[in-house]
Amino acid sequence: MASKVTLIPGDGIGPEVTRATLRLLEAAGAQVEWEEVEAKSIVGLRQEDAHADPLVTSLLQNRVGLKGPLTTPVGVGHRSLNVALRKTLDLYANLRPVRNLPGVKTPFADVDLVIFRENTEDLYSGLEHVVLPGVVESLKIITAHASARIALFAFEYARAYGRKRVTAVHKANIMKLSDGLFLDSARRVHVAFPDIEYNEIIVDNCCMQLVMNPHRFDVLLLENLYGDIVSDLCAGLVGGLGLVPGANLGDRCAVFEAVHGSAPDIAGKNFANPTALMLSAVLMLRHLGQATVADHIEKAIYSAYRAGRWLTRDVGGKASTEEFTSAVIGALEAKVKG
C-alpha cells in the first residue's frame, strides 16, 4: 500500500531537484502517493492559526514530508519558514548523516559521521528585539526537556545503528548555565546507555579537530546554533551541501529535506545537483519501511558517482540535472536486472 507524503517543491532550484527525485523514486518503484502543497509563511501566526495552515495540516495528517529548499531573506524580511515549521510541528531532532561519495575528491576518505542537532530552541530560534537604537538583544533559551530528548534520540540511534560513541559539543566553559544544562541533560541520559561511549568537546576545538581528523568522531550531539554551523562544516568535508541529506524528526511527523539553499542564480538552468534531495528521499523511504527500495536507490546513486561520466558541475562534471538523473536511473535498472 502506498504511503501518502506531503511534497513541498520549494523555491529556486527546488522544483528542479524535486522533479529529478520524483523521477528516480518512480523508476525505483517506491510506493508513495504525493500531496503537493505550496509553502506559505506561517511566521507570526498564533499557534491555532499556524496549525490551520494547509501545509501544516497536510504534514500532520500524512506524518511525512519531502521538502526542497526554501528561501529565507538575509537581514530583512520574514523570519525563516524552515524554523517556523520545525517549531510549529515540534520537529525537535535534526539528523544529518555525512559520508563520502565515490569519485568526489575531498581531503579525507571514509568520512562517516552522524550529526544530531536540537531543532527548537537556543539562539537559532530568533528571539531578539531592539533594546534601544544601536543595541539589540538576542535570547538563548536552553531547557532540560529539549536537551534530554535530543540526547535520548542520539543515544537510541547510536544503539540501533551500531554506533560506538556520542560526543556532546558545547561552550560550557563560557556559557556555564545554558550549555552546562545541555551537558547535564546529556550525562543523565547516558546513564541508560552504558554500551555507548560518551564524551564532550568545546565547540571551537571540535571544529578544529573535524578539519584535522574527522575520523575521531562518530555521532555528534549539538545545540541548535552549534549544530547548524558544525553540520555545514561536516558537509564540506565530503564535497558540500549538495551531497548531504537531512531530516527533521518529531513525535508527530517527519520532514526530509535538502539542506542546501535555493540557489536562485542557477534556477531554471538545468544544472542543479539533486543528490541531496535524492539521499533525503532514501532516508524517507527507510522511515516509511521501504528499506529495499531505499537501498536500491542509494546504491544506484553511488554507482553513478563511481562511474563519474554524468556528474553535475558542482562536483567537476558537465552533466545537466536531467542527464545525472538518467544516469542514476540507468544504474538502478542495471542493478535490478543484474
Image (tube, rainbow, N blue to C red):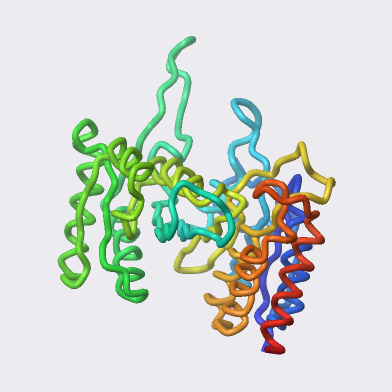
Tag count: 0
| Figure check: 225 above or below 214 | above
Q: Position of residue 129 (x, y in %)?
A: 47, 25
Q: Quadrant of residue 278?
A: bottom right
Q: Position of residue 1 (x, y in %)?
A: 67, 89
Q: Position of residue 184 (x, y in %)?
A: 18, 51
Q: Is residue 58 visible?
A: no
Q: Foreground: 74 or 42? A: 74
Q: Is residue 282 left or right of residue 35?
A: left
Q: Position of residue 34 (x, y in %)?
A: 74, 72
* Residue at (50% x, 58% y) in the render: 100
Q: Foreground: 299 or 242? A: 299
* Residue at (26% x, 67% y) in the render: 164
| Figure check: 215 above or below 267 | below
Q: Is residue 150 visible?
A: yes
Q: Foreground: 264 or 338? A: 338
